Amino acid sequence: MVEKQVLKRAAVKLLRENIKLKRGEKVVLVTDRHGDPIHSALLQAATELGGVIREQRIRAGRQHSSPIPEARKTLLWADVLLAPVDSSITHCDETVAAMKKGLRGASMPGIYPELFAKLLTADAEKVAWTNEKIVNALRGAREVRITSPSGSDFTLSVEGRRPGRNGPDLSRKGSVTNIPFGEVFVAPVENRGDGSIVFDAWHLVRGKICSGAIAIKKGRIAGWDPGAKPYVDYLRKAGSCGFTIAELGFGTNPAHKKPVGNVLHDEKIYGSAHVAFGQNVSFGGRNRCGVHEDVVILKPTVWVDGEKAVDKGKII
C-alpha cells in the first residue's frame, strides 16, 4: 500500500513542476470514483498551492472517451484539469472543446496509487529527449511499417499528420496529457492501413492482460481471432466508427518495462508500440467516435519511410 504522504508528494510534484499551477488558477478535479486516495492527494495539493477548485463527478461505467455532457460547463470554466478516473475523458468532445479555450492538465484513466507514485521516479529528461527523437523521425513521414516477434506485420499511412508527444511539460495551454507521461503518438490516415496487428497486452479489467490478433484492411478492422474478440466487442458498442484506426504510438518511459494489465502504464513501456481504434479528432484525426481504446505491441521493429527507427524494442 502506498502511503498518503508519498501520494501527496507526487501530487505536489505534478502540479508544481509539470503543470506549473499558479496561485488563483481555476482547477477542476473530475472523478467517477468514490474514496479515491489519488483524488484526495490532488485535492490537498491543489488547495495548498493556491488553486481555486471545483469537483466534478461524472457517471461511472462509461466507455473510454464517450461523452460527458454533465462536465461541459465546468471544463470550460477551468484553467487546469485533474482527472483520476476509471474511464478516460482524454478524447471526449467536452475535453476537446475546453482545450480549445486553453484548458491544460492531466487525464489519468485507470490510475492507481502505485502507478501514480511512479511520477516521483520518472526520468523526465530522458523521456523528453526520446520523445523528440521519435517526433523528428515521424515529422513529414509518409508510411510506417511495424513487425514484432509475436507476429505483427502491418503498414499505416501518416502522410500529412503531425506527431504529438506526451512528455513531462504539462504547462502548455490547450494541451491535456495522460499521466504517467512517456509517449509519442500520431493519428494515421483513417482509410489507409493494411496487415496483421498481434497485440501483446490489452486490459479488459485492471490486472487482467488479454492478447490477440486483428486483421486490418484500408484502415479498418476486417477480421480477428478468438483472443481479440473481447477487444473487438468493446469497440463494437460504439458503432462502426469503433473499427477505424485512430492512433499509432510509441512508449518512451524507461521506468515502465513490462505490462501490468493497465493500458495507461503499458502503452508507455520504453520501446513498445501501441495502436488504437475509434476517436482521434482530438489529436489531428477525422474519426469522431464514442470510444478510443489502445492495444500494446512489445519489442516491435519499426520502419519509417523504409528507415529503421526501432529495432526489436530498442529505439535507434
Image (cartoon, rainbow, N blue to C red):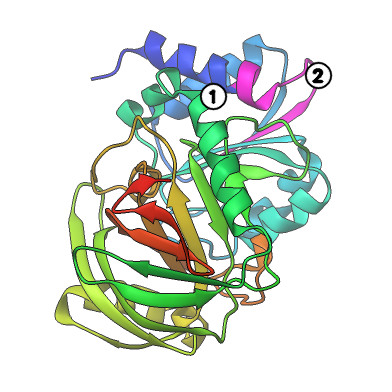
Q: Which numbered tag is attached to residue 267?
A: none
Q: Residue at x 62, y 66 (%)?
A: 141
The spot of residue 252 in percent (x, y) is: 44, 41
**Residue at the limit of the structure toward the right, as seen here:** 101
On screen, residue 204 versus residue 251, left or right, reads left
Which portion, as a residue range, is magenta?
Answer: 15-30
Q: Residue at x 72, y 13 (%)?
A: 50
Question: Is disc 1 surrounded by few (<14), some (14 to 19) or many (20+) residues within 10 Å?
Answer: few
The spot of residue 106 in percent (x, y) is: 58, 37
Q: Where is 5 relative to 214, above or below?
A: above
Measure the alpha-carbon separation of dots 2 and 1.
29 Å
Q: Which residue is mark 2?
A: 24
The spot of residue 188 in percent (x, y) is: 57, 72
Whether 91 is among the magenta residues is: no
Three-letter residue code for mark 1 = Glu
On screen, residue 197 versus residue 208, left or right, reads right
Pick whichever, 295 or 145, lies toward us. Answer: 145
Q: Which numbered tag is attached to residue 125?
A: 1
